[in-house]
Image (cartoon, helix red, strand yellow):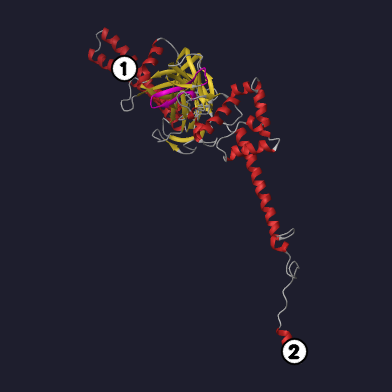
Amino acid sequence: MDEKQKHSDKTPSPAPAPGRETAREPASALTGGPGHPVAERKKRRTRTVVAVVVVLIVAGIVLWRWHPWGGASTGANAANGASGAAGHGRRGGAPGGFANQPQPVHVATASQGEMPVVLTALGTVTPLASVTVQSQLSGVLQDVYFKEGQMVKKGDVLAQVDPRPYQISLANAQGTLARDQALLQTARLDLKRYQTLLSQDSIASQQVDTQSSLVKQYEGTVKSDQANIDTYKLDLVYARITAPVTGRVGLRQVDPGNYVTSSLTNGLVVITQLQPISVIFTTSEDNLPQILKQVQAGQKLSVTAYDRSNTTSLEGGSLETFDNQIDTTTGTVKLRATFENRNNLLFPNQFVNTRLLVDTIRTAVIVPTSAVLNGSMGQFVYVVKDDNSVTVRPVKIGPVDGERTSIASGLQVGERVVIDGSDRLKEGAKITIPADRAKGASGASGASAASGASGASGAHGASWAAHASGASGTHGHRRHPAQASQ
């Protein structure tokens, strides 16, 4: 029995019949049926691809509609661009196609008007008078009657030096004068008596001559005494220190109680005249002839002072005079202009920008300063022709007044010049003017713009695919928006 069991265990199991399923895993598990992780990954990958394609389509439409070389300009330009790209077998966004596109620029018309001939220079505000107040005698400074920074007038009392020593000296001189005057009077009486006796031949003539000399001696002494009195009176005047000019006082250099002398280094205080005030500036010797011509003709040249930024006008004045020689080291000459300075906007030693109006050109051709460019040929402008192309025109400029430049030769009144966007231009380049495009879009080109906009909207799947192919560059050329909408 044991041998039978062993034999049955070693017997192999029979093979399954054809078409009968076994107990193994179903076939759907190997192929990734619904709900399996493999199938879920495939679905997510498909959705990601679809989303990327949609984003590319939208980006292509936006790039096509809003880029300067896109189809928003005119239908003819877009069609030509598409055909040119197809002929060369390149994608529509190739650099060669962009270079031939019209460039958007801003233009201005050359006008006629008055252009001032202005000389600009850096100047220094210089007071007409700056006085260091000194004590003219020695003594103790008793009182100071001014405040620092105060405006004073000529003759105002600023300080007081102790006058008592000079009052005593004055009294002494007056006493000496009275004594000498009495001696002089006595000598004159004696001389009169001697002259009477000499007429009677009762006295020698020598004694009369001696008495006459004594009278003259006393007369000299009296004059000397009077001079001493005047000196001490003047000292008493100097003891009251007054303002020599009208202006603003600075910081006090000596406090009351100090002993002052006439040899103080910094003095008592400095007074600077502010009204009127002057500005000294320099100009090139080349400008001197036209200035002299106006001055010799009796013209009063106006000068305007501006702040350091050269934007704010501080004060207006006139040219007063100029130096008598040219500085050989710099080739410039100094000029002085005076200003009333009513608002005290000009401060001594302040750096300002001065503008000297020399002359005025009545019929000048004027363009914006941004229109004038510099190149290897010199200064030039881009002139706009009737066919919306530009040409390079060399010009010779005249006076410049901020944002305006006068053209001496090379340009006529009424011609249009490019003032912005000239960095991408060359001779014969085509341009578009945004203002003109806006007017055209509101008129006859409104329908084509509307059709282009409808093509860009992508109402059905065919137009979306067409724009996507043009934007991504998968096809040989970019299609016109009207063709894509069909």
Q: Secondary structure at mark 2?
A: helix
* Marker count (numbered): 2
Using the image, tell me which numbered label, if any, was put on residue 4: 2
Residue 377 or 401: which is nearer the viewer? 377
Q: Secondary structure at mark 1?
A: helix
- Amino acid found under the numbered disc labelled 2: Lys
Confirm whether the magenta stretch covers residue 375: yes
| Image-quadrant location for residue 376 | top left
Q: Can the viewer see residue 72?
A: yes
Residue 267 in the image: state x and y as whole percent.
43, 34
Q: Which residue is mark 1?
A: 215
Most distant residue in the front direction: 18
At x 66% / y 23%, what residue is drawn? 446
User: How many angstroms separate mark 1 from mark 2 (CA)?
Assistant: 191 Å
Q: Is residue 345 above or below residue 301?
A: below
Q: Which residues, given as a range, are shown in magenta?
A: 370-388
Q: Quadrant of the N terminus?
A: bottom right
Residue 207 in the image: state x and y as whole percent.
25, 15
